[in-house]
Image (cartoon, rainbow, N blue to C red):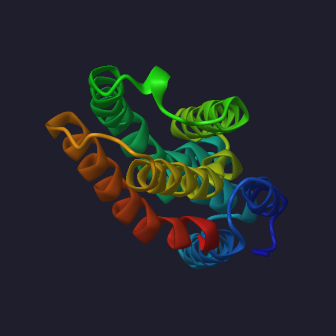
Amino acid sequence: MAGHELIDDAVTALARHLPADAVDELADGLAETYARHLAQGLDPDAAARETIAEFGEPDVIIAAFVHQSPGRRAARALVASGPAVGGCWAVAMVTGHAWSWPVPAPVRLAFGVGFLAVVTAMVFAATARRSYRRTRIAGAAGLGLVALDAAILVGAVLLPLTFTWPLAIATGASLTRLILTARVVPRLLTG
């Protein structure tokens, strides 16, 4: 810690909301800036206030980190692209008479519940404004999305379906999303 109560309080507030490595870097920057202000002749209280003024209040710093978080950005991209992929599947299912597909009702229900859970989690992460932890939900939601896309692709291959152009577009859209999401998820789970 920097040695002044105002700065120590700011670091404590940041530590409650941000990843430890980010807090460590911010704490170092606050300490260096505080020391620089002291070396310029400011008294400790003025140096601490000036340091906080340069960096911003903890709420402002937290909001900036949340806004730029990888989880929030990934969730926003997936939420934005979801209707296009979903629309492709809607057309494929209507033209392919999905109501007649030999899929047991419990499987349909499980898929629907999983879909709603993933969409809810993605929207929750995408709309985060003040909670960095909330943006990290995107990692788990991304895993769920990969599982849903994989399940529907496996179903499209294993079910005795007539291969149509809407089905080809829908499978291509899901496969593309699956690959892109699978590439991002490990960073979201560890970041």
Q: Nearest the camera: 47 or 63?
A: 63
Q: Position of residue 11 (x, y in %)?
A: 75, 62
Q: Nearest the camera: 54 or 68?
A: 68
Left or right of 165: which side holds 19? right
Quarter of the figure with residue 90: top left
Left or right of 1: which side holds 95? left
Q: Which residue is drawn at 56% across and 43% down?
A: 63
- Is 47 placed above or below 135 here? below
Q: Nearest the camera: 20 or 7?
A: 20
Q: In which quarter of the image is the C terminus?
A: bottom right
Left or right of 82: which side holds 91? left
Q: Where is residue 9 in the image (x, y as percent from the top left)?
A: 82, 56
Q: Which residue is drawn at 53% across and 50% down?
A: 145
Q: In which quarter of the image is the N terminus?
A: bottom right
Q: Can residue 129 be seen in this view?
A: no
- Is 174 placed above or below 70 here? above
Q: Can residue 22 be seen in this view?
A: yes
- Is 120 placed above or below 146 here? above
Q: Position of residue 10 (x, y in %)?
A: 74, 55
Q: Residue at x 30, y 48 (%)?
A: 171
Quarter of the figure with residue 84: top left
Quarter of the figure with residue 119: top right
